[in-house]
Amino acid sequence: MRYIDKSRFAKCKTKTWDIKSKQWSDRVKDAADPCAEIKAIGNKWSSLKRTFVAEFGAKCWYTESPQIGTDCDVDHYWPKGRVKDADGAIVKQGTQQHPGYWWKAYDINNYRYSCIYANRARDEGGKIDYFPIVDESMRCWDSSAACDYAHHLILDPCSIDDVKLLSFEVEIGKTASAVTYDENPIGFEKVRLSKIFLNLDHETITPHRLRAIKDAQAAIRCLKLASSLNDDDLDDEDRAGIIEAKDRLKELCNRKSPFSAAAVQHILSNKNAQYLADFIDELDLTP
């Protein structure tokens, strides 16, 4: 998971988005049944898919899986309809069911470009209607309340603090928590739940993340070996290999590249090595 800067969402809007989104939001606000009105208006957020891809790359913001041979969704981080807690129970107050965060249905800041495995029900995971929070008493129920962002328990790629919570097991390619439970119990729980609800370690995803890690390791080994040789000992094939290794590391670190966060983690552990010194500034090693 790489950080997605919401300030760049302005570049992703269609020419009429601000006008149209306000019209749709006003219709929903004035409706007796907001959820029914959202269904009547239809899926308007899909018009942003192309511009999201152009700005941030053709990959899921949650899993970093590339969009190859499949469609991707625009996930509503705050669910626009039914809401479930961490146990899968529909959120209620007495007999009243939570109406969903309908007021965020057409708010571009609520959108996350997502693969099907992260957003839909697949095997034991998928975000679907889940939106667990730390303290249920702090959940907002209407548009007049301050939103419950500070209490969310699903990792958000638009939060730099959330992104920093995620780490990777370099030997198997699975996700892990960058913090212990004792250090940060809420952060640890966010990672634990996100591994499930976002399908971060699904069997169709993990091998490809591991491949990115292995590619980073191989490129670093090549550069490390070359650095131990005298320049006169390098032949044309060696020099071509060095260029290829550097280009591969640049590609792996590119924010638009699949599984770049896992590759970056491995490269960061070598960032002070002399064999990276001449091009380290060309690698995007930020979260």
Image (cartoon, rainbow, N blue to C red):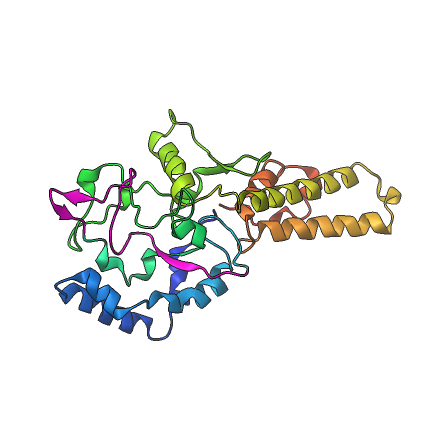
What residue is at 30 percent from the left and 39 percent from the top?
Answer: 86
Count of numbered marks? 0
Q: Nearer the viewer, residue 197 or 6?
A: 197
Query: Can residue 66 be seen at all in this image of the molecule?
Result: yes
Query: Can residue 282 be seen at all in this image of the molecule?
Result: no
What residue is at 26 percent from the left and 56 percent from the top?
Answer: 80
Position in image of residue 105 (x %, y %): 27, 60
Q: Can you name the residue that lies furthest to the top here?
A: 182
- Position of residue 18 relative to residue 152, above or below, is below
Instruction: Look at the magenta stretch and give its main secondary structure.
Output: loop
Position in image of residue 193 (x %, y %): 37, 38
What residue is at 82 percent from the left and 47 percent from the top?
Answer: 238
Read off the magenta span: 69-98
- Position of residue 172 relative to residue 49, above or below, is above
Q: Nearer the viewer, residue 176 or 265?
A: 176
Residue 201 is left or right of residue 89, and the answer is: right
What residue is at 66 percent from the left and 40 percent from the top?
Answer: 217
- Position of residue 260 relative to residue 41, above or below, is above
Residue 82 belongs to magenta span: yes
- Position of residue 282 relative to residue 49, above or below, is above
Position in image of residue 203 (x %, y %): 52, 43
Residue 183 belongs to magenta span: no
Q: Can you name the residue that lies furthest to the bottom here?
A: 16
Q: Nearer the viewer, residue 6 or 120?
A: 120
Q: Quadrant of residue 20?
A: bottom left
Position in image of residue 79 (x %, y %): 28, 53
